[in-house]
Amino acid sequence: MTDHVARRLGLALLVVTASFGYASRMEVNSTQAGVIRWNKPTTPYRNVFMATGIPPGFEGTFLPLTYIENLKTTRSHIQSLRKTRSLGTYGVIVITEEGTFSDDQYDDKGHIREAEFAKSWTSSDKSRLIDSKGNRYVRISKSTFYADAVEKYYMDVVIGTQSYADSNGNTLVPTSKGSIKLNEKEYRILLYGIRGANDTMDIIFNNEEKSMLGIESDNEAIRIYKITLKDSGGPQLDIDERTAKLLYSFQK
């Protein structure tokens, strides 16, 4: 592994362990690990960040409808996220009591102002919204801990609730919190979206061992791969899919 690739791997793990969470007045609380603190704004917080046009009751985590439709078809987070970016939609929208923000690549949050939303709300149960460009979003959870919510949604769609075992005794067991146990070791989906343009394989990571594996799923099987990262020359994480080695195949 080159020094550059090692730095990219370290960056990704840093992003995983330090940058997802919930927007509050003074901080972003991460359930993936740690707390990132923001400086208190010099003007009243609500005037700076609050999207006042959003009616009460919309709090939660929203994903683009395009992402949801593509995830169900491709069973790939990175392909679905890439599709939403090509259409100019937000990667995820989180509405809290104190403000509204997005995280397009799951690596850097930005607040959204009222003007970026359309005035028409598309459902009486407050589970759908539309932005000012006409892009539609669906609430996947009333939780504002959006990394956890998206992880769980991904696992529900891609893995489901069934446990698997192969002929060699290897096991894959989904958990209730949106992770999987692979031979008793816990892995979570890497949401970090800065990836090479040709990458199609998702990445799962074990935080204790700081290890990453590739994952693919289709109608026939869930496949887990040993992966290596190649030198991208930039900030993205690129899997060298030519050298990916199949470790486990769990038949559906």
Image: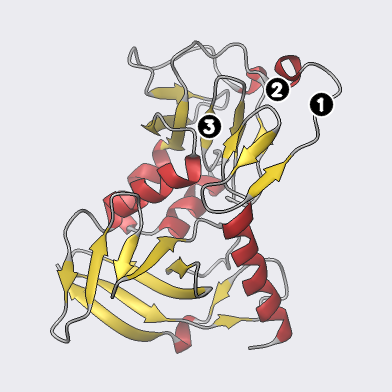
Label 1 SS: loop
User: At 44% from the left edge and 46% from the top edge, which residue is drawn?
Assistant: 148
Check disc 1 and report the residue beneath it: 41
Q: Quadrant of the C terminus?
A: bottom left
Comes first in the chain, label 1 or label 3: 1
Secondary element under disc 3, as helix, strand or loop, is strand
Q: Which of the two discs, 1 and 2, sits closer to the camera?
A: 1
The Cα–Cα distance between marks 1 and 2, rounded to whole angstroms, is 10 Å
Which residue is drawn at the image coordinates 72% and 70% (left, top)? 234
Q: Identify residue for label 2.
A: 49
Judged by depth in the image, the label closer to the viewer, 1 or 3, is 1
Query: For mark 1, does the 10 Å Cα neighbourhood hold few (<14), some (14 to 19), or many (20 or more) residues?
Result: few
Residue located beneath label 3 in the image: 94
Mark 3 or mark 2, which is nearer the start of the sequence? 2
- Decide which of 252, 26 is in the foreground and name it: 26
Residue 152 picture location, percent across and down? 36, 48
Question: Mark 3 Cα within 10 Å, few/some/many (few <14, many 20+)?
Answer: many
Relative side of 211 to 100, left or right: left
